[in-house]
Amino acid sequence: MKKYLSPFICGFGAGVLQIVPVAKSFSCCFIIPLAAFISLVLDQRASNNFGKIEMRKALLFGALTGLYAAVFGSFFDVFITLITKNNDVIALFPELQKMVSSFPVNLEIQKEVLRLFEGVRNDILTYGFSPLYTLSVVINNFVVNTLFGIVGGLVGAQIINRRNQNPVE
Amino acid sequence: MKFRFRIIVFSLLLIWFLGIFFQYFIKLDDRLLFLYPIINKSYSLVCHQNDNKLISFSGIHSLICARCTGIYAGLLAASFVSLFINFKSPVRLKLFVLLSLPMLADVILYSFGIYNYSKTIAFVTGILFGSVGFSYFYTSIKELFAEIHIRK
């Protein structure tokens, strides 16, 4: 476990930052890749080993950072929704309604989509929990965060290796 | 890196990039409307999706901001080039930093109100960063395959 402490810490941080709107507007798509990069830097400092990072290790650290971010991000998202009975689905529902209605698509499909999301919205407002919303959050977080973590880990390792090779560059 | 892997990388980036304009595809097939909120949620994980910063054209808008769209456009363009040119090593770190600076400067300057947000500037600076960033991603994948090959 100690060996993979840095992905855990960075994944936790990224998971928390992902649900903070202000932090998100600044860091945008860099939260997870940056977390993977920092996890590699922290690992090098903790082990005092500034040698070349193997890409297999970078891949593993990136994937783990993304996975931890997905676990914590999903947990906080679902937990906060449960307590507050409010989330971005509720906030954006009027906008979604307007947008769906403006699409030049079949009226039946429009109604069906709106009914589906009204169900999700009502579940959240009443119970603070919607199985469909939770499922979409969990799947999205796991797929997207893991992929972005891997990319961040690989690119991060490459940057660290280049920097260690040419410190004066 | 073998050509088929380069094709896979390019295809994955292309799918991700096309997903940014998912609203356009709903016009082609009504049933895609069911997927819209889920796809939108996926992209919301990697972008703030601020309304004023989205790229809009003919009544539809992108699912991510102009800067992120630029970054992915840069990645896609560089991966397209990589189909024909096999990059030997990533660009120098100095060049990477140099081409990332316009994006960083843009974020800082408009955040401090020096000038108003411009989608064009955000998009162009994103392209610069994305295209140079791809060389690092590409070299990493190449090294990863080499490591796997050696272990075999």
Image (spheres, coloured by chain):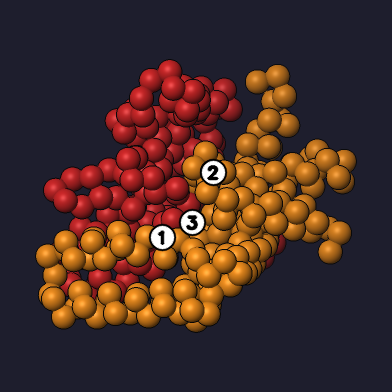
Chain colours: A orange, B red
**C-alpha gap between disc 3 and disc 2:** 14 Å
Q: Position of residue B107 (x, y in %)?
A: 47, 29
Q: Mark 1 against mark 2, which lies toward the viewer? A: 1
Q: Name the amino acid, label 1.
A: Ala
Q: In the image, what residue occupies the spot 50% across and 66% down?
A: A86
Residue A152 versus residue B38 in the image, above or below: above
Secondary structure of the residue carrying tag 1 is: helix
**On the image, numbered disc 3 is attached to which residue?**
B45
Q: In the image, what residue occupies the spot 37% across and 56% down?
A: B16
Q: Residues within 10 Å of mark 2 (few under 14, many from 20)?
A: few
Of B145 and A104, nearer the camera is: A104
Residue A13 versus residue A87 in the image, above or below: above
The reply to whether label 1 and label 3 mark residues of one chain is no
What's the chain of the residue with tag 2?
A: A
Q: In the image, what residue occupies the spot 65% across and 48% down?
A: A35
Q: In the image, what residue occupies the spot 45% across and 49% down?
A: B47
**On the image, numbered disc 1 is attached to which residue?**
A91
**C-alpha gap between disc 1 and disc 2:** 16 Å
Of B130 and A11, nearer the camera is: A11
**On the image, numbered disc 2 is attached to which residue?**
A22
In the rendered structure, the answer to whether residue A108 lies left or right of residue B16 reads left
What's the chain of the residue with tag 1?
A: A
> Can you tell which quarter of the image residue B152 is in?
bottom right
Count the marks: 3
Q: How crowded is mark 1: few (under 14 residues within 10 Å), some or many (20 or more)?
A: few
Secondary structure of the residue carrying tag 2 is: helix
Q: Position of residue B119 (x, y in %)?
A: 31, 33
Q: What is the quadrant of the C terminus of chain A in the image?
A: top right
Q: Position of residue B30 (x, y in %)?
A: 18, 72
